[in-house]
Amino acid sequence: MADKVYRASTTAPVNIAVVKYWGKRDPKLNLPTNSSLSVTLSQADLRTLTTASCSSSYPASEGDSLLLNGEKSDVSGARTQACFRELRARRAALEASDPSLPKLSTMPLRLVSENNFPTAAGLASSAAGFAALVRAIANLYELPASPSELSLIARQGSGSACRSLFGGYVAWRMGDAADGSDSMADQVAEASHWPEMRALILVVSAAKKGVSSTSGMQQTVATSGLFQERIARVVPQNMAAMEKAIQARDFASFAEVTMRDSNSFHATCADTYPPIFYMNDVSRAAIRAVEQINAAAGRTVAAYTFDAGPNAVIYYLEQDTEAVVGTMYHVLGGEVDGWKDAAVKGLKPSVSLDEG
Ligand code: DP6
């Protein structure tokens, strides 16, 4: 059976943070300066599908490889290598304890990965990508690893990826161990706990982002004074308030913390020297539109949040679809310059949550 090809496939969802990860205390181990919390979106709309295979018939000279959306992708980077190394070490330990197991850990790996959404458009593609990569290889190696344990590995690929190993509402606890052994994700609540939650994604631009998250957050850590306030006080408060809001299914609180945390994160970007601007005029118009929607409703029915790019994610509850999605089209469609170019990745028109 020397030529046998071993294969496993998996999908991983996108997550959008409502309390943002921004800053590394250890870039090598990818340890964050603060905890974060996200909502996992439906895989029906946004997901990465990855197949991992290995075989002793794959030429060793070709090494490990990754085909991403049909194109050869570099796997020599330290983060991908860290994931491969961690997964191989766990497989090697299994093989050492049971000599009858095939020596998959010594075979070249081939990964084939596909996103059903634009890569690097600020839609957290690295999160779904590394979560799928880690789980596909863990399945291939038949590792008895829990989602939290896999999140430890995925974190080393991309920080936000550790949250895509769970569905629903997910926290990444920053931890305090120097080796990162307690910096992993856990589930705060299942999607079914608050099934009315929806996310509308306004794709303001599907272009690749200007300043990558990785380098942007390092510049912020190095130069922003405001950032110190954010990690010491703002985020710990937001984490506590957010967990409480989710447990109580209190949308007004969930929304306020989401919007405040997004504003706080983008304020630290503006306080970075030289400043980093991820939002553009269309993004800011979306903020105003959400404020108008909430004012017109006389209560908070919508919350905006922005990652390291101009696209808006609007959270709302299903019963308010008409007020939120209808008004978003109306307000932005008529008044915003450039809105014609902004595709609404409407997602039926919303993204429902699932268990991941
Ligand atoms: C703004 O996870 O992409 O989306 O760990 O360097 O790969 P690396 O960064 P990444 O950063 C995500 C930043 C964010 C906020 C968040 O998702 O929490």
Image (cartoon, helix red, strand yellow):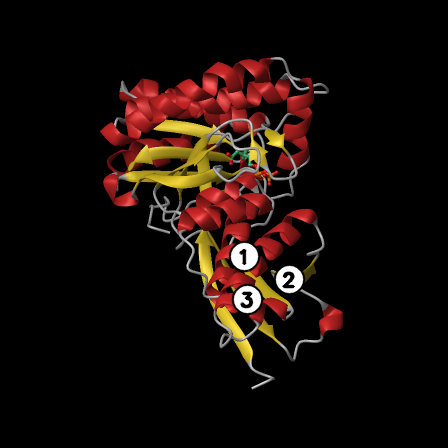
**Would you name the residue on which mark 1 appears?**
133
Q: Which residue is mark 2?
A: 66
Give the distance between the C-alpha atoms of the residues marked 1 and 3, in whole angstroms.
8 Å
Pick out the residue farthest to the right. 61
User: In the rendered structure, are the residues bearing label 1 and label 2 in contact, judged by CB atoms less than 8 Å apart?
Assistant: yes
Q: Is residue 338 visible?
A: yes
Give the spatial CA distance, label 1 vs label 2. Answer: 10 Å
Q: With respect to residue 15, does 4 lie above or below?
A: below
Could you say where residue 161 lies in the image, as x and y percent from the top left? 51, 45
Under mark 1, the amino acid is Leu
Numbered badge on residue 52: 3
Q: Is residue 275 left or right of residue 179?
A: right
Quarter of the image for residue 210 reads: top right
Of pointers 1 and 2, the one earlier in the residue sequence: 2
* Vertical order, 119 against 1 (above or below): above
Q: Secondary structure under badge 3?
A: strand
Residue at left offset 63%, top offset 77%:
56
Q: Amino acid at mark 3?
A: Ala
**Does residue 253 appear left or right of residue 185 in this picture?**
left
Classify 10 Å Cα crowding around label 2: few (below 14), some (14-19), many (20 and above): many
